[in-house]
Image (cartoon, rainbow, N blue to C red):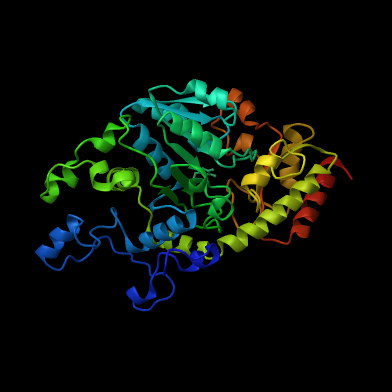
Amino acid sequence: MTADHRFGTAQVHAGYDPAANLDSVTPVIYSNAAFWLENSQRGHAVANGDTPGFLYSRVANPTVGFLEKRIAELDGAKEAVAFASGMAAINAALLNAAEGGGRIIAPYDIYGGTFDLLRTLLPQFGVTTTFVRDINDPAEVEAQIGDDVKAIFAESVSNPTTVVTDVDALAAIAHRHNVPLIIDNTLPTPYLYRPLEHGADIVVYSTTKALSGHGNAIGGVVTSGDSFDWANGRYPQFTTPEFILGEAAGRAPRSFVEAAGPLAFIRRIRLKYLRLGGAVLGSFEAYLQLIGLETLGERVSKETASAAAVAAFLARQTHVRKVNYSALSGDPQHELVARDFPSGIGSVLSFELEGGAEQTAAFINHVRLFSYLANIGDARSLIVDPANTTHREFTPEAREIAGVTPTTIRLSIGLEDPDDLIADLTQAFAATYGA
Ligand SMILES: *Cc1c(COP(=O)(O)O)cnc(C)c1O
């Protein structure tokens, strides 16, 4: 397989060679913990990275490797490293940039787990976050950048209000200050948007969601481009000689930048955060995600078209105060969406019901086709009340800035017939408010 196939071809072929896997055309599940090293010469060569090969599945596993290569190709990335969950990937990416102390700049409008990580856990490790109200306001973001800033983090499309980040503009600000831009691209997936092509340096995904698409495996991935200069003086962790890259392999002392140049970040995240943090993806989960990826474009394009139809339907309802779907015509971000997301923003949307918590609960209890659960990107349509579930970690102030209220309802549109979804919502409105 060559690396220059179009998206639809890459999603079923990239990163996997049947001829190297006993002619199995579906990816093989390598379920072993460790790999036979044959003899001491080859063992040393594999351990030192001088010969391709596998040692132990906490460091690298062939099935997980197929997934990493396939996602890297779909994302237009140089390399990818898979983790056991999206949160493991995000935590590793943020610490790999900011470890040793420093500050991150991020909007309030981010996934609840990421917000809690930034607000309550990373400060325990000397990494604090300055939250900005509007990540698309260059003046507000630039005013916060100082020598202690190690990364800017944002979601390409935010959950649940679908605010779109102008990644090109944000990357220009970040790079003017020699800081990398890390983008969580979980909602649109690489099918709708590839942040590296817009100037982002590192991309993170929860592969649990639309990337694998069936709600049956937790996973995450970090992908990297090769244009950021990790030797710019702000990141000593990449320029300090590393025992395992130098002396342990019988070489002169080497740093990650000396060993890998612009791939220092992604190589180091594998060697430090995956190998030592230990949150590795299992080979069976990698297999499920590879199978899910085979239909990524087909699923996401249908779900996105249905989400747009549902959003337009909701915008016409008298009992809906507001629809959050930035691809709707008339949305303040419509122009940016048309420029950067020509095929749409994805399957997630949210809306505000008239009334209070009582109406929200009634509406959720009345839907029949939508499943009430805290996930997105499933083949089935899902409904949730973020204030009570996915965004519980938010302080009331942060929740307000992020646009989540007690009457916010989030939908993730699946593969059902959109007319059936709209009929289900229609009967739920009637049952909640009277016909
Ligand atoms: C779900 C999600 C995460 C966390 O991923 P897990 O796989 O649940 O750990 C991070 N970011 C976004 C945008 C998500 O939707």
Please provide percent x and percent y for residue 304.
67, 54
> Vertically, is 374 above or below 32?
above
> Vertically, is 373 above or below 298?
above
Say whether residue 121 is visible.
yes
> Vertically, is 180 above or below 249?
above
Residue 282 in which image quadrant:
bottom left
Residue at 70%, 45% in the rendered image: 327
- The answer to whether 104 appears left or right of 159 in the picture is left
Q: For this rendering, which residue is in front, 28 or 170? A: 170
Please provide percent x and percent y for residue 88.
41, 43
- The answer to whether 133 appears left or right of 197 in the picture is right
- The answer to whether 301 appears left or right of 114 in the picture is right
Please provide percent x and percent y for residue 200.
47, 42
Locate the C terminus and report the quarter of the image it occupies: top right
Please provide percent x and percent y for residue 291.
49, 65
Q: For this rendering, which residue is in front, 416 or 3? A: 3
Say whether residue 117 is visible.
no
Furthest residue in direction right, as rendered = 435
Furthest residue in direction bottom, as rendered = 23
Locate the N terminus and report the quarter of the image it occupies: bottom left
- Count every numbered label the image shows and give the total: 0
Residue at 41%, 62% in the rendered image: 284
Residue at 29%, 64% in the rendered image: 32
Residue at 39%, 44% in the rendered image: 227
Residue 323 in which image quadrant:
top right
